[in-house]
Image: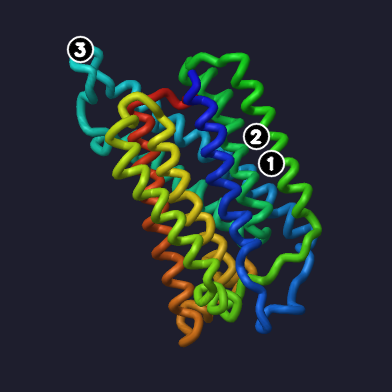
Amino acid sequence: RCERWWVTLFSMWSNTSTALGFSWLPVGECTRGEHHSQSSLDALVGFGLVGAASAGICITLNAQKLVHNRNYDPVTGRQSIHFTRIPLWWAAVIANGLSELVNLAALGFAPATLVAPLGCLSVVFNAFTAVFWLREPFFKRDLLGLALISAGVSCIVMGQVGSPAPPITVPYLREVVTSSSFYLYLASLAAFLALLVLWAQPRFARRFAWVYLAESAVFGSATTAAARAFASLCGPPLTGDWANATSREGWPFFWGSLLLLLLTAVGSLLTQNQAMVRFSNSE
């Protein structure tokens, strides 16, 4: 179906918009001169973690879809019971949360400009998992979509490897939240989400998966930004300092990024499940 192309586009947008968004943020006096190239070891650790997280996310999402498939009543065309009352769904959600924690750890070792695009690997994994596990169809044009994802991820990652990355510190975050770019980024996400919920959802959500996928992508973009900030402020085994959780200057950013991370992750989870109730996983 043509919706598969929307999956490719929105998945790539979700995982790259935040990464590219970090390049808009200012590097003022407090961070100028502090740029450093990410060490090869940290980059490898980040790549390994995001690869494991992508595989875990793929498996758990397909497990959630399996629940929806089994819970479907062909007579009424509706769910037999609400999916939140099924233990397997909760097990998949918890496992998905653990996979996202691995993704969070990856953001502590490598910049979002490298980690976020690699999140598209979950789409590649899902293309095959949905076929062999859920018995969903696979079309020739899906190969083209996977090739485009692979090419796009490769171009972004290769263009960022070895490039200087500002350390995500409390002074840096303070400068970010007072910049016009930050508020432009938030306003664009809010406007796009409002457009989807108020205009697109009533008109197209019953027929097209891209509505829910776009909403999930908006939440996912904010989740990635919050996760990068939170992971960078966390202490060992990550690269930050646990004192950020209690210090006068650091606690608003530490707990604020965690709150934003949780809220947007829940929003993304709910919109993804709305899509899975109505459409196949490969869509």
Q: Which residue is tagged 1?
A: 153
Residue depicted at 53% across the width and 59% down the height: 225
Residue depicted at 50% across the width and 73% down the height: 177
Q: Which residue is tagged 2?
A: 149
Sequence-first disc among 3 and 2: 3
Q: Is residue 106 visible?
A: no
Q: Amino acid at mark 3?
A: Val
Q: Does 254 sit left or right of 18 as displayed?
A: left
Query: Contact (CB < 8 A) between labels 3 and 2?
Result: no
Residue depicted at 54% across the width and 29% down the height: 126
* Percent of width and height locating residue 92: 41, 38
Q: Amino acid at mark 2?
A: Ile
Query: Contact (CB < 8 A) between labels 2 and 1?
Result: yes
Residue depicted at 34% across the width and 22% down the height: 69
Q: Does 94 sit left or right of 104 as displayed?
A: left
203, above or below 245, in the image: above
Along the viewing direction, whichever of 4 and 91 lies nearer the viewer: 4
How many residues crowd around disc 1 within 10 Å: few (fewer than 14), some, or many (20 or more)? many
Q: Does 184 sit left or right of 277 as displayed?
A: right
* Percent of width and height locating residue 123: 57, 33
How many residues crowd around disc 3 within 10 Å: few (fewer than 14), some, or many (20 or more)? few
Q: Amino acid at mark 1?
A: Val
Q: Which residue is tagged 3?
A: 75
28, above or below 123, in the image: below
SS label for mark 3: loop
Q: CA distance from mark 2 to mark 1?
A: 6 Å
